[in-house]
Image: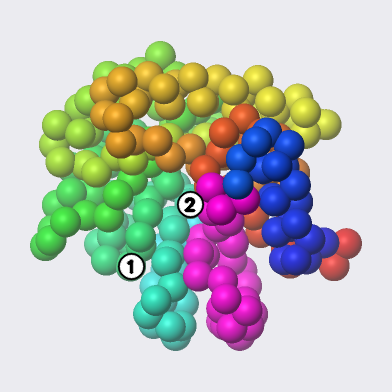
Amino acid sequence: MSLGTVRKRITAASARCGRAGEEVTLVIVTKGQSVATIRALYERGEREFGENRAQELAVKVDRLPPDIRWHFVGPLQSNKVRIVRPNVSLLHSLDRPELGPAWVKGPGLAPPALLQVNIGGEPQKHGVDPTEVVRVSGELIAIGVDLVGLMAIPPLVAPAEASRPFFRELKRLGQQLRDVDPGASALSMGMTDDFEVAIEEGATLVRVGRAIFSDN
């Protein structure tokens, strides 16, 4: 696949559900990709890039243009917040209440964040239980977290259509969050294998890497 193909598929998936392609932000996940590769995408007009390791993020931020909007999409340890917080536009993986105080601590306003939900109830995955979304969201908002929506990684299933119920459930939980904060409307869901289904179910951000960088 390629960037152009992914862009076309985003547009087509959006059209199938009556949405404009511009309603969906493509976050290009650049884990393991070189600075030169990211710069080439930047020169094609891309500005939204995602990393899941704090140290790798810091290195790339220092070597690439300052108008890139960096997203942190991986698990975040509290002791790495000091690296990630100054460098990102959005934290996708606020996966536990205990991370909230560390995120808001420090100079200036912390970047906005998404509450990560363990939508499949998988013990090996990060995220809050779906039944705890409203309670945890309220606690985070109360301490000053700019919570703008939800993120989830559904169980690995095939075909992609099997992910639809998980995306649909995250959308339902997102509505519950909007009842608490009407402005919290972002839904980060969908990756290489299922981003089109996620868009059809309401994703506002999709996190895609392999489909862009793979030769297949």
| x and y percentages locating residue 175 in the rendered image | 41, 22
Quarter that holds the C terminus:
bottom right
Query: Pointer 1: residues within 10 angstroms few (<14), some, or many (20+)?
Result: many
- Give the quarter of the image for residue 6: bottom right
Q: Would residue 192 be found to the left or right of residue 169 on screen?
A: right
For the point 59% across and 22% down, the residue is: 168
| x and y percentages locating residue 65 in the rendered image | 43, 83
Question: What residue span does the magenta drawing correspond to?
Answer: 21-50
Residue 99 among those drawn in magenta? no
For the point 27% across and 66% down, the residue is: 86
Q: Which residue is mark 1?
A: 87
Q: Would residue 211 be found to the left or right of residue 56 on screen?
A: right
Q: Secondary structure at mark 1?
A: helix
Q: Is residue 103 above or below residue 203?
A: below
Q: Which residue is mark 2?
A: 73
For the point 59% across and 62% down, the residue is: 28
